[in-house]
Image (spheres, rainbow, N blue to C red):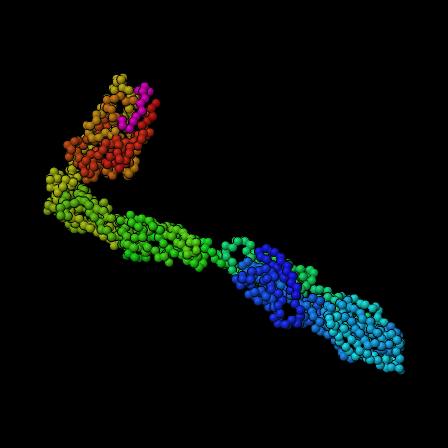
């Protein structure tokens, strides 16, 4: 046996070809060769690399031992049955290994042995020869058939030695041998009417085999003219798959004889093959050769037809010709696609160029009809690459993403170049396996969770959801809360989360009054080999419930009852007291309304339901109000659902005067606004007269000083009202000297008499901020720190000074002043009250110069005494001069809600 190994290296694998030869008729188990050893493979790794035969290439005659690679005969091989008369006979087999992929093509040549003897179609062959036949006349004999090929095929013919005939053995173009009986000596029927010889066919085997037949030559009477064909050889073309009955050739032979001796009959010669007789037919009378069966170019491209023509006369001598039929190929075979190996799945992280499948494509047609173009159909991330001859590999042609496509149907189309073109297609399904390449993603980056306070611990409050486009373990999401502190405690003592569902639960009952909201982070994490995660923010907002009743802060009294005096001379609208309450809730739950529930049957009082102010509704009447006190029950109710309420008991005592009321009260704090009996008209007259007088006096003094005091460095004139008629003087003095003003040089003048008017500069101040609708200029009095020092600056254009007053200043500016009776809470009332208590006059908080300017009651300012009676810090801490460093918050007085700002004009 001969072993020929051819190894070809190709991309992404190795494809090798190895050849063996085996004689036909070999017994079962005959060793052909060891594929693994001949290819140099490691025998110990055949099983692990799944050494196997490609199913489509298996043959019943041969078998491979997959454990050791031995190729042996599994069934007796009959070459003549497999390959017939073909000169070469091969069996093909394909084997491959995995990890890495290696494909081997095994070609086994079946070697012919001389196991068949030549044989004639008939054991008796009769040849009729006219006695008039001349020496040299040839008579073709039926050919013997030997299934063997090559040197074992039919080699020659022999005939019994005689004096009349000899054999001329000739070879056809296809290599077949045939014999012609040649007349060597004229025959004489009268001497011998029949001659018998043994015809022997001999093959070329060693030893040779023979076959014999009895040749009987009958001598006939003479017919001296034979038919003649137009030409000895005819050549025609015939398309394969020509329809049955189609004309191949119209033969024509002539005979000069007449009658039966000139009537010609056509027939095939005796030595043509049976296959030709199956495919073609001839009309004996007309010589018309027609197609009898389907002619296939792939079976044979050339057929030789031997025809004889013989007249019907006695002792007819036949004439012979040869017809060569060339079959032209048609594109009648579509390409055939065979997949040798296919990978079931590929990772989505597979690199471009990964081998997916190996396939082969064949076409039985010839030339252009057998030339094939192969491609992958559609837009898929795969490509074809030629590997070896008609073998192709399918490779990945780019990144794969299972989340976009979890599988692909790869269709391979093979198309030949014939006309019309024929195509074939075959599809495989390639599944993309998942990799953990996607982190879970929350449906929201921020979750706002509203939880009503007083919730039940352990109650469900919300659900967070994360999505992961991966599958399997890579998409199995677990949820957790990231550690953080809320009010000094771990967030996990406030809320918990279900790891599987993402449901959030409150671990405690929330109180809006203690905690209004809190924020924490939740994390979603998949279960992939390389865990991926993402975070989201959860903001828990506590929703207030009406769970707190209002609490009355003032007025307070002994045993829960507050006593408030009421002068008998009080006018309607007199402020008796104000109920101050608070509610720890928020929004509508903390909006309060006030009402009198009991004790006001005669309609003496009215209650402002918004502010809680208790005022008289009418004058005190002796007849209608004979008793000395009123026991009122005040209810404070919030607007929650359901509403909650509390009550306060107020005992209003009728008194004859304010002093009596002060003595009869339970505490000094109730003496606020008990001076309502003062005549407001008298107060206004006194105030206006005083202000006008002071203004006139100040103008005179300023005019005299402006002209006579030559040693004064500078005169400060901060408003047009303050320095009428002296602007020229101020301008001259301002140009004389310049001095930078520091914040310590200016201070707000306090209560009466503390600072003389001579050293005071008046600065126009425009009120802004929380003073309601009162946006009018007010003049506050300031003086320099060094009262006796010369002023070193000139103010030539006023600057705006803004102040944002605190709540007590707001009450002063927004209350009624000079319009109607004075009530508790009015600026006049409060100032008068403080005046009585301190022994000072009504304008104790304003300098004489301010009064002289003729301003209204807004000229003066309260001393801003704190509620506990203590004097606040120096007002300089609330003064801001542009360009100066701001005063720290720690130095500011507690009596103000915000600072005053003074812009000092630029010097000339």
Q: Which residue is drawn at 15% across and 47% down?
A: 650
Quarter of the view holding residue 820: top left
Q: In which quarter of the image is the C terminus?
A: top left
389 to 272, vertically: above or below: above
Q: Where is residue 778 drawn, in percent x and y?
A: 27, 32
Residue stretch in magenta: 733-746
757 to 669, vertically: above or below: above
The answer to whether one can see residue 651 in this image is no
Q: Does the magenta stretch include residue 745?
A: yes
Q: Residue at x 73, y 74 (%)?
A: 117
The front one of 434 and 56 is 56
Q: Where is residue 315 drawn, in percent x and y?
A: 86, 79
Quarter of the view holding residue 394: bottom right
610 to 302, vertically: above or below: above
The front one of 730 and 207 is 207
Q: Residue at x 20, y 39 (%)?
A: 825
Is 891 placed left or right of 369 in the picture?
left
Q: Where is residue 84 drawn, in percent x and y?
A: 69, 70
The front one of 372 and 836 is 372
Q: Where is residue 822 drawn, in percent x and y?
A: 19, 38
Q: In which quarter of the image is the N terminus?
A: bottom right
Is 713 placed left or right of 72 in the picture?
left
Quarter of the view holding residue 827: top left
């Amino acid at each position: 046996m001969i072993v020929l190994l051819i190894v070809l290296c190709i991309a992404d694998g190795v494809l090798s070809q190895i050849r063996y030869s085996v004689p036909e008729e070999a017994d079962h188990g005959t060793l052909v060769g060891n594929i693994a050893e001949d290819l140099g493979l490691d025998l110990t790794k055949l099983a692990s690399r799944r050494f196997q035969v490609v199913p489509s290439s298996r043959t019943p005659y041969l078998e491979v031992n997959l454990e050791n690679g031995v190729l042996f005969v599994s069934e007796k091989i009959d070459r003549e049955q497999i390959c017939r008369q073909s000169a070469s006979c091969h069996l093909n087999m394909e084997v491959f290994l995995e990890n890495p992929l290696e494909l081997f093509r095994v070609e086994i040549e079946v070697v012919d042995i001389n196991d068949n003897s030549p044989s004639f179609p008939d054991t008796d062959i009769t040849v009729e020869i006219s006695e008039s036949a001349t020496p040299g006349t040839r008579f073709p004999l039926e050919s013997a058939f030997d299934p063997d090929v090559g040197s074992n095929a039919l080699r020659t013919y022999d005939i019994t030695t005689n004096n009349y005939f000899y054999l001329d053995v000739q070879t056809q173009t296809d290599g077949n041998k045939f014999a012609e009986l040649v007349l060597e000596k004229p025959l004489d029927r009268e001497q011998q009417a029949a001659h018998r010889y043994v015809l022997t066919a001999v093959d070329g085997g060693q030893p040779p085999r023979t076959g014999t037949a009895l040749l009987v030559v009958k001598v006939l009477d003479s017919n001296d003219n034979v038919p003649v064909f137009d030409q000895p050889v005819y050549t025609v073309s015939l398309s394969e798959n020509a329809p049955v009955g189609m004309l191949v050739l119209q033969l024509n032979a002539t005979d000069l004889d007449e009658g039966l001796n000139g009537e010609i009959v056509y027939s095939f010669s005796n030595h043509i093959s049976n296959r030709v007789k199956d495919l073609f037919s001839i009309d004996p009378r007309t010589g018309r050769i027609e197609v009898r069966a389907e002619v296939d170019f792939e079976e044979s491209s050339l057929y030789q037809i031997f025809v004889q023509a013989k007249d019907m006369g006695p002792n007819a001598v036949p004439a012979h010709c040869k017809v060569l039929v060339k079959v032209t190929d048609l594109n009648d075979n579509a390409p055939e696609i065979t997949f040798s190996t296919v990978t079931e799945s590929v990772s989505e992280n597979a690199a471009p160029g990964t081998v997916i499948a190996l396939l082969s494509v064949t076409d039985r047609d010839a030339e252009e009809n057998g030339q094939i173009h192969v491609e992958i159909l559609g837009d898929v991330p795969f490509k074809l690459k030629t590997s070896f001859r008609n073998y192709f590999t399918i490779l990945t042609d780019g990144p794969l993403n299972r989340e976009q496509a979890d599988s692909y149907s790869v269709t391979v189309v093979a198309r030949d170049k014939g006309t019309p073109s024929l195509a074939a297609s075959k599809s495989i399904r390639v599944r993309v396996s998942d990799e953990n390449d996607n982190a879970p993603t929350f449906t929201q980056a921020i979750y706002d969770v509203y939880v009503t306070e007083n919730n039940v611990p352990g109650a469900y409050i919300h659900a967070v959801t994360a999505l992961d486009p991966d599958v399997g373990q890579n998409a199995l999401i677990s949820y957790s809360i990231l550690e953080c502190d809320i009010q000094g405690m771990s967030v996990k003592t406030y809320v918990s989360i279900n790891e599987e569902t993402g449901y959030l639960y409150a671990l405690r009952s929330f109180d809006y009054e203690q905690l209004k909201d809190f924020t924490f982070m939740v994390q979603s994490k998949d279960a992939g080999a390389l865990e991926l995660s993402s975070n989201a923010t959860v903001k828990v907002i506590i929703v207030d419930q009406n769970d707190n009743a209002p609490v009355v802060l003032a007025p307070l009294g002994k045993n829960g009852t507050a006593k408030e005096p009421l002068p008998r001379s009080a006018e309607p609208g007199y402020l008796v007291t104000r109920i101050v309450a608070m509610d720890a809730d928020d929004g509508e739950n903390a909006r309060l309304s006030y009402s009198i529930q009991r004790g006001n049957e005669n309609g003496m009082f009215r209650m402002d339901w918004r502010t809680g102010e208790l005022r008289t509704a009418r004058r005190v009447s002796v007849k209608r109000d004979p008793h000395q006190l009123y026991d009122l029950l005040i209810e404070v109710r919030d607007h929650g659902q359901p509403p909650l309420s509390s009550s306060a008991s107020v005992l209003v005592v009728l008194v004859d005067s304010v002093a009596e009321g002060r003595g009869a009260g339970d505490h000094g704090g109730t003496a606020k606004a008990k001076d309502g009996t003062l005549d407001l008209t008298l107060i206004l007259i006194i105030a206006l007269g005083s202000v006008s007088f002071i203004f006139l006096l100040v103008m005179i003094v300023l005019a005299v000083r402006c002209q006579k005091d030559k040693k004064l460095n500078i005169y400060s004139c901060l408003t047009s009202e303050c320095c009428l008629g002296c602007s020229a003087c101020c301008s001259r003095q301002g140009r004389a000297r310049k001095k930078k003003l520091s914040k310590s040089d200016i201070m707000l003048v306090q209560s009466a008499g503390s600072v003389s008017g001579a050293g005071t500069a008046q600065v126009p101040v425009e009120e802004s901020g929380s003073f309601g609708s009162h946006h009018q200029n007010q003049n506050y009095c300031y003086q320099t720190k060094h009262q006796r020092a010369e002023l070193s600056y000139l103010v030539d254009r006023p600057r705006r000074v803004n102040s944002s007053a605190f709540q007590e200043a707001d009450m002063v500016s927004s209350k009624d002043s000079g319009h109607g009776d004075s009530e508790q809470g009015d600026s006049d009332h409060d100032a008068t009250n403080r005046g009585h208590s301190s022994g000072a006059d009504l304008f104790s908080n304003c300098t004489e110069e301010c009064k002289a300017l003729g301003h209204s009651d807004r000229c003066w300012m309260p001393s801003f005494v704190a509620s506990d009676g203590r004097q606040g810090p120096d007002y300089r801490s609330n003064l801001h001069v542009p360009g100066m460093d701001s005063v720290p918050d720690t130095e500011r007085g507690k009596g103000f809600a915000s600072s005053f700002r003074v812009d000092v004009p630029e010097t000339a």
